Each structure stands twice: as C-alpha cells, then as structure tokens.
C-alpha cells in the first residue's frame, strides 16, 4: 500500500489526525519538499513530533527513481509519501500513483489543507468566485522578461468574467538561475510579484479592460500559520511593502461583492479608496 | 477569541491536529451542519472522540442569533465554531467573523481539507485547470425546471477555455420542498445530477460548442473517506448508475491533458471510448 499524505499548510500540526495515524503506522515514510514546503517546521521537527524517520527525496529521486519508493509499498509493505498541502496537487505525484497502479500496488490519498482554500478563507473573497489559478515564475525561470503572457491572459480572462485569480508564486528548490544547485532555495515574495504584475497590468491595458489602471492585489502571507498576514491595496503600493517570511500568495480580485468589499476593508485594513466599488 | 475550525471532509479524524487541539482547549464549542456535513460520523461520535461538548446551531441560530456565540468568545472566553470542510467557504461565516471584528473579538482560522482539492486529487484532473465552480440546486429549490442557466453558462464558459468545472451538488438540511422543516435532510446524488445535466447539455448545444454531444462527467463520491469512489463516463451513462452513500460531487471536464486522460482510464476505469482524445 502506498498512502499519499498531505502535510497541510504550515507546521507539524497542519496534518490531519488521519494523516498522522497513517504516518505513524507506516513501515517507511518518504517526503518531497520541492513542489512546496512547510515554512513553520523542519524535517527534524516533523520526525521528532510524530516519532518517525522521514526519507526526503529530491525531484530526481522521485521522478527518475520511483521504483525504490514503490518497492517499499509492494506486497506487505506500507509506505507513506508526504507532500506539503494536498498530496496530489502536483502532476509528478499523479505519475507516481499511476506507476503504483501499474505494479498492482494499492494507493490511498489522505488529503491536506491547501493554499487555495486558505487564500479565499483568510481574505474573505468567496471561494466560488475564483476562476482558473496561475503561477508567476521568476523571470529567469521562464527565459524572458517580466510576466509570461499566459499569466496575464489568465488574469484578464478571469476579470472579464468578474472572477478572482489566485496567483501562486514561484518556488525554486534545488534549481537556481544557473541550473541544478542542491543548496538553492528561493521563494518569490508578494511584493516582488505585485511589482512585476503592476508594471504589466498597468501598461498592457488588461486593467483598463476591467475598469481602471490601478489594479488591486490581495496578499496572503504565511497561510495556515498562527499569525497569517492579509493585505489588500493597489499592486503598485503592495510592491513597496514587506510581508515578512514566505510562503506568500497573491490574489488579483475580479468584481467585489458587498461582503467581500467589507471583509477586505474590515479584516485586512485595505484603504477603501484603493478598492473598486462593490457590485 | 473566536476560532473557526474546519472539520475537513469525512469523519472525526479529518480535522487537523491543530484543529483538534483548539477544539479541546476551548471553553465552548459550537458547530453548524447546514452548509455541509460529515458523512462518516455523528455529533455524538465527534464529542466522544475529542472529549468535548458540541452545541449544534441551525441556520437561524447562527444568522439570527450570532450574539450568543460572540458572547462566549468575548473578553477572556475561548470559543470554537466548527464547520465541515474549511470553515470560511460559506458566506454566512464571513458575516460572523465581521460581527466578531465589530465587537473587538479576535478571530483565528484553522483550515480544513476541502471537496475542491479532493475532487482534483482523487480524479487525477489537474487542480490548476479548473475554472469557476458552480452548485447544482434541486429543481424545486430554484423554482424552475431542470438546470439554472447560470450553471450551464459556467460550464460552457469553462469548457470554451478548456477548463474543468467542479459542480457542487445541492444539500438541503432544515428546509424541504415545502419550506422550513427541521427533520428534512436531502443530498443530491451524482446520478441525479448527471441526468439533469445530460438532458440540458446534450440539447442546449453547450456540448456541441465543446466538440460533441456526449458530454463526459467525473463522479467523486465520499471524498475523504477510506474508500472514495471515482467514476468517469458519459453523463447519460452515469445517470443510470448508483454511487452509494453521499456526499457526491460531479466534475464536467474541459480538455484532457495526456496524464489526466491516463488517470481517468487507469485509476477510475473510465471507458476510453467515452473520453475525448487527450490534447
């Protein structure tokens, strides 16, 4: 049996009780932290807290050498594969699940809390009013300047329909500007993201199409931690602020309903003048 | 302090360790099960498992009489408000949080696992390729026949962009076809939903616009349980099947990438002839 377990958002207590039980009952526990990571803990603290040994695999270890993980899950073996957030959000893990199925290994998924739900939950923006999400890569990672066209298109498409866009911010672990580098760890912060998007949206006419050049952003920093930060303002203003430690998310809102508008003002201290009128 | 805690998807072990700790440390624990519920447990089992007393409030109790909950959270009081899934997905709880802020009561959110993440995770459909979600109401609840136009529009808009649509299925607790009824509890099942949508999509030309009249659906039943069921087929075929106990979800996929196509065939046993070719 191969059980994919989501560690949730922040630290060793973000896992579900079911996930913790699966972890503690497993013969071997693997983990990857290259698709995301837990900002509020370390592998050692996770091992101590749950009383288990965790074998951390890098991207190559999972994608090029999945057989060693599958071997541990074959026949009577009981292996757990840990990931931050929900375990199947990343494509690479669907691939591992398919390989397990190919070998006749039973798989199970224990869900984890996600940045997506937290972004809506913490900001007061309604979950069902989000459109497609997108990821903003570091400029060096997409081989161009500024923001890829596909990111701007997703935001524009959503805004035309009045929908919010969750923008995941790039994470580079094990790969840097010059290629593979085991020590490289880099997290795009929301001020940088807001700056990149402000430049593009305020010049590309994307904002114009949605009713104004002063595009608004909502920053969610350290979702799932005891003291998450949520801030809403014009992107250009957000670009000049410091939101502290990662991980950060950025939401580009579409139309704001009355309750969403009130939540941004009352709960995040957004300057009312920066927000579009509620619809 | 008022702490909103998500119970997660299925039973008493779907809560996070952090959520369980908050629950056990609270002076008073409130809960509502009218926006969603845990199919794998009861209030009594939750109380036993966590060693707490839970005061369940109906919609009127939360929306018309929020002050009694806020009183328990005021000054030195430590109150927890429990909801299935993530605690702030429902608008009504944003309202409660705003009322707490008005009274100077500190609020905190402990996230829970969500049906949204589970639908992607269990089906192999990629999370970032979902567009706006929608809810399919019982025909009697929207006062018309069949499927509301807004639901069809959301699916069509998403499909035009190649995106998947998560369709939440209606839940009626405390309100039935004839109005308020404390004993009423009704959950739309995925076969019924597939039947309603098949009739509309295959006649309204919505499916035509996306490349064929045999619209495909993906059913996710009992997400978060030890044995969730995932099934993919033409909507008309899904309408004739029985997916067992609630809760159910339905996804109307957009374009299928190669890995998504493979996941539906290999992991859910979808008949390959029913699926569109991968793009």
Image (cartoon, coloured by chain):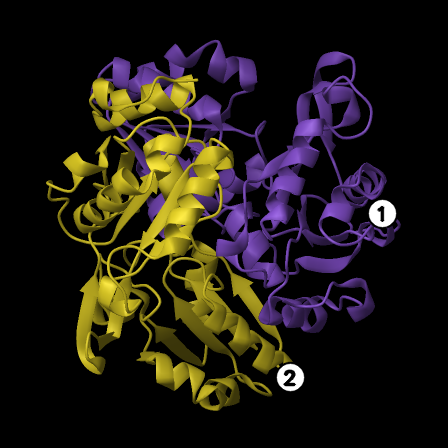
Chain colours: A purple, B yellow
Residue drawn at x 74%, y 63% as measured from the top left: A276
Badge 1 marks a residue whose secondary structure is loop
The residue sitting at 51% across, 52% down in the picture is A117
Q: Give the answer, above or below, for where B82 lies relative to B249.
A: below
Q: Is residue A56 left or right of residue A98?
A: right
Q: How crowded is mark 2: few (under 14 residues within 10 Å), some or many (20 or more)?
A: few
- Secondary structure beneath dot 2 equals helix
Residue, disc 1: A239
Instruction: Return the residue nearer the eye: B11 or A90.
Output: A90
In terms of depth relative to the viewer, which is nearer, B241 or B76? B241
Which quarter of the rendered picture does the C terminus of chain B lie within? top left
**In the visual, does B275 lie left or right of A41?**
left
Q: What subunit carries mark 1?
A: A
Residue B231: x %, y % from top left: 22, 34
Q: Is residue B257 above or below residue B100?
A: above
The residue pinned by badge 2 equals: B102
Residue, x 39% and y 18% (percent of image)?
B278
Residue A8 is situated, as x and y percent measured from the top left of the image, at 49, 45
Looking at this view, name the residue that lies furthest to the right: A240
Percent across and percent down for residue B182 are 21, 81
């Amino acid at each position: 049996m191969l059980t994919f377990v989501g560690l949730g958002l922040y630290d060793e207590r973000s896992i579900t009780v079911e996930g913790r039980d699966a972890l503690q009952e497993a013969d071997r526990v693997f983990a990857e932290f290259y698709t995301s990571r837990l900002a509020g803990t370390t592998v050692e603290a996770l091992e101590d807290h749950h009383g288990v040994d965790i074998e951390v695999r890098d991207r190559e270890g999972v994608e090029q050498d999945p057989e060693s993980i599958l071997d541990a899950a074959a026949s009577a073996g009981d292996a757990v594969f840990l990931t931050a957030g929900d375990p199947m959000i990343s494509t690479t893990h669907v691939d591992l699940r398919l390989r397990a199925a190919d070998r006749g290994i039973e798989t199970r998924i224990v869900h984890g809390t996600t940045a997506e739900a937290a972004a809506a939950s913490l900001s007061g923006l309604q979950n069902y009013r989000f459109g497609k999400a997108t990821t903003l890569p570091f400029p060096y990672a997409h081989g161009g300047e500024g923001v890829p066209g596909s990111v701007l298109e997703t935001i524009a498409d959503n805004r035309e329909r009045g929908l919010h866009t969750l923008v995941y911010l790039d994470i580079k672990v094990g790969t840097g500007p010059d290629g593979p580098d085991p020590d490289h760890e880099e997290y795009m912060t929301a001020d940088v993201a807001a700056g990149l998007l402000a430049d593009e949206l305020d010049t590309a006419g994307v904002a114009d199409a949605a009713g104004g050049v002063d595009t608004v952003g909502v920053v969610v920093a350290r979702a799932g931690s005891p003291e998450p930060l949520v801030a809403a303002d014009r992107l250009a203003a957000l670009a000049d602020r410091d939101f502290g430690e990662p991980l950060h998310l950025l939401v580009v809102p579409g139309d704001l309903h009355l309750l969403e508008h009130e939540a941004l003002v009352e709960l995040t201290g957004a300057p009312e003048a920066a927000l579009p009128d509620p619809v």
